Image (cartoon, grey):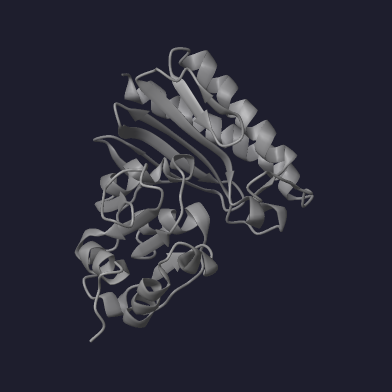
Amino acid sequence: MDLTKALAVCLEAVHDAGRLTLGYFARAPEPRFKEDGSPVTEADLRAEELIRSRLEQAFPDHGIQGEEHGLTNEGAGARWYVDPIDGTKSFMRGVPLYANLLALEVDGEVVVGAANFPALGEVVYAVRGGGAFLNGRPARVRDTEDLSQAMVAFTDAASFAKAGMAEGWQRLMAATFHRPGWSDAYGHACVATGRVEVMIDPLLAPHDAGPFGGSLGEAGGWFGDRSGRPGIHGGSGMSSNLPLRDEVLDLMRPSVVRT
């Protein structure tokens, strides 16, 4: 696998998808709603089509799993995960924290990934063994060791109760310094770049998690699910620095006993 080529294609694809979505962002596009109640706009659909076209031209033997257009080439050993607009609810309201996400997984490991925040002018990306970067500058997680000094980001406060994590979330809020609602991909990117210590999503699909399965590790941190399993397929997502990971996981587990 030529990771240099894969990274170049990945960055070009999310950059061009970002330019496309910015044209819609300024107009606050009206969404339609899918069967699961989540919104989708014309910008989501066109951005995924653009990214898929680039990937199919560069890597015709790779699989592609996209939020809007499903899975192609299912048996391929290399698979790209595409979220053309992560944070559509923010996007359609004119909030600039949405992202274009793209990641390559080979044999169960994310080896290349990028999270492009076009309205912010930020791109967080990583390649296996080559480090994590923010706009070309090395990115590292924050080295905070005291949870009482940590900032914890989240997407939707109601999602913790829906996922049976309300008590754990209450414990974590009580134990931390600040709980900013820097939602969706932006929260995970903030952990990878040392701006907050922890980000938790009780429900997270692989296409939402893709880039962070690589960038957190390359930035000196950790990404996995709420049970402590690393990777992007656990159905939930947590980004953390290493000193705080186990303490946060313990607080969020239902088995924690109040004292």
- Residue 217 higher or lower than 61, as above or below: below
Question: 140 or 176: which is nearer to us?
Answer: 176
Res 143 visible: no
- Residue 230 higher or lower than 15, as above or below: below
Question: 256 or 107: which is nearer to us?
Answer: 256
In the rendered image, the quadrant that contains the C terminus is bottom left
Q: How many marks?
A: 0
Q: Quadrant of residue 226?
A: bottom left
- Residue 66 higher or lower than 88, as above or below: above
Q: Residue drawn at (54%, 68%), measured in percent from left and top?
A: 158
Q: x, y (%) of residue 248?
A: 28, 67
- Residue 109 higher or lower than 118, as above or below: above
Q: x, y (%) of residue 44?
A: 66, 39
Q: Residue drawn at (48%, 16%), measured in percent from left and top?
A: 58
Q: Quadrant of residue 74?
A: top left
Query: Is 84 positioned to the left or the right of 147 in the image?
Result: right
Q: x, y (%) of residue 70?
A: 56, 29
Q: Residue drawn at (44%, 74%), measured in percent from left and top?
A: 179
Q: Residue furthest bottom?
A: 259
In the rendered image, the quadrant that contains the N terminus is top left
Res 155 visible: yes
Q: x, y (%) of residue 207?
A: 48, 39
